[in-house]
Image (tube, helix red, strand yellow):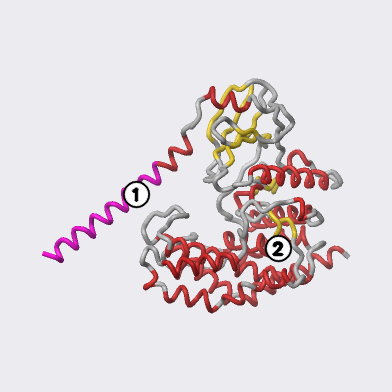
Amino acid sequence: MHGFYQGKFRHCWVFLITIKQMCFLKYDIYRLNKTTLTDKAIEDIVSKFRLEGKLITARTFGSGHINDTYRVITDTGNSYLLQKINHFVFKDVPGLMNNLVNVTRHLKGKLTAVPGADPEKQVLTLVETNDNGYYFEDAGGNYWRVFLFLNNTKSYDQVLTEKQAFEGGKAFGLFQALLADMDTGLIVDTIPNFHNIESRLANLAKAIAADSAHRLIKLSPEIEFINQRRDAMCQILAMGRAGLLPERIIHNDTKFNNVLLDEHDHAQCVIDLDTVMPGYVAYDFGDAVRTIINTAPEDEPELVLIKLNIPLFTGYVKGYLKQTAGFLTEAELNSLLNGAMLLPYMQGVRFLTDYLNGDIYFKIHSPWHNLQRAKAQFQLVKKLEEAQETLNNIILRTWQHEKDEAK
């Protein structure tokens, strides 16, 4: 009798998981296709900004999960992006918006001195409010902002070709190069300790101590993996604190879909600037490599399928160093591969922490989804470690090539 009910409940659990997956899918479709505000509500909000013309249409836009975004078109033919800022994630909205103003102003100022550059196309443009600000707070305590819409651009969620990898590297490299001389004191942390591995490991330690979801007993291999690399993964922070690595303004979320490309697939504009904060260039390099070099999805359950796409890595390095070789220090160059190891390690730590906490942060599709993600990220770290000499040689050869070209 016990075995019979155990089997029945096991099948019921699978059924419940399936229902949960369906609910997530329905929610995503709902978010992508439904205008969640009435046209009148949107009209009232955009009336607070200096748009050209009167509102004609407003529809949800993009696939972002943090801010709610609408594409707004007016009767003059102008297009804008209206965004509701998620002030639960970004708690200091005035500080966030001040960052955006300072960063976009600096980028445009630098590009005006570059022959052939077009600052209005290559940098996001914030639209002012009627009272000369850059955001509006409504009666419900929600914060809104407006950008000019960049026409004839596109983005990709996945890098498929070496040319795309090169353009991604060039885009984020130029972004860093233009901001290399910006005063970090002008920028506040929008998400404190975002790439601070010591903070992430401390959060994991708290989750281990609490074991609130009673999952710790099966995690010995993962915790051992983390502990074996703890000192090595803190090296970038240690070098920064010792003054060996300069702190610069970086993007902090270098996914390929945060680069807009033109109709010829050339990099045009880096977007999603909410996480732009002081940090080390290796963080941006590592996060981009994490998403580009992996031949499998981030949550691949079959670990043997996780391999390295060396040509895509090479393409990214060539594009990145073409833009950054002129300002990177030798210590920063040598830290890049450390960043490539650190970011999947840190992402794995975050996934494992959430798994131990009962899946309260990341959206999941099964009770073991976060553990599966953590295992996949740690496997990627192992592959990067195995190929360390090859990857480092690619970086050094490309660096030398750019130095020779500059002579």
Callout 1: few (<14), some (14-19), or many (20+) C-alpha neighbours within 10 Å? some
Q: Check if mark 2's residue and mark 1's residue have beta carbons within 8 Å.
A: no
Secondary structure type for disc 1: helix
Position of residue 156 in the picture relative to residue 25 (left or right): right
Q: Is residue 183 left or right of residue 338?
A: right
Q: Which picture quadrant has residue 244?
A: bottom right
- Give the side of residue 100 with respect to residue 72, left or right: right
Could you tell me the amino acid type at mark 1?
Lys
- 184, above or below 62, in the image: below
User: Does 348 appear above or below 362?
Assistant: below
Report the span colored magenta: 1-26
Residue 150 in the image: state x and y as whole percent.
67, 37
Rounded to the nearest angstrom, the CA distance separating label 2 from label 1 is: 39 Å
| Residue with the mark numbered 1 | 20
Q: Quadrant of the N terminus?
A: bottom left
The C terminus appears in which quarter of the rendering? bottom right
Check disc 2 and give the amino acid type: Tyr
> Is tag 2's residue or tag 1's residue first in the polypeptide sequence?
1
Indicate the quadrant where residue 320 lies. Answer: bottom right
Quadrant hosting residue 101: top right
Which secondary structure type mostly characterizes the magenta part of the structure? helix
Q: Residues within 10 Å of mark 2 (few under 14, many from 20)?
A: many
In the image, residue 74 lies at what x, y percent? 63, 23
Report the residue marked by disc 2.
Answer: 280
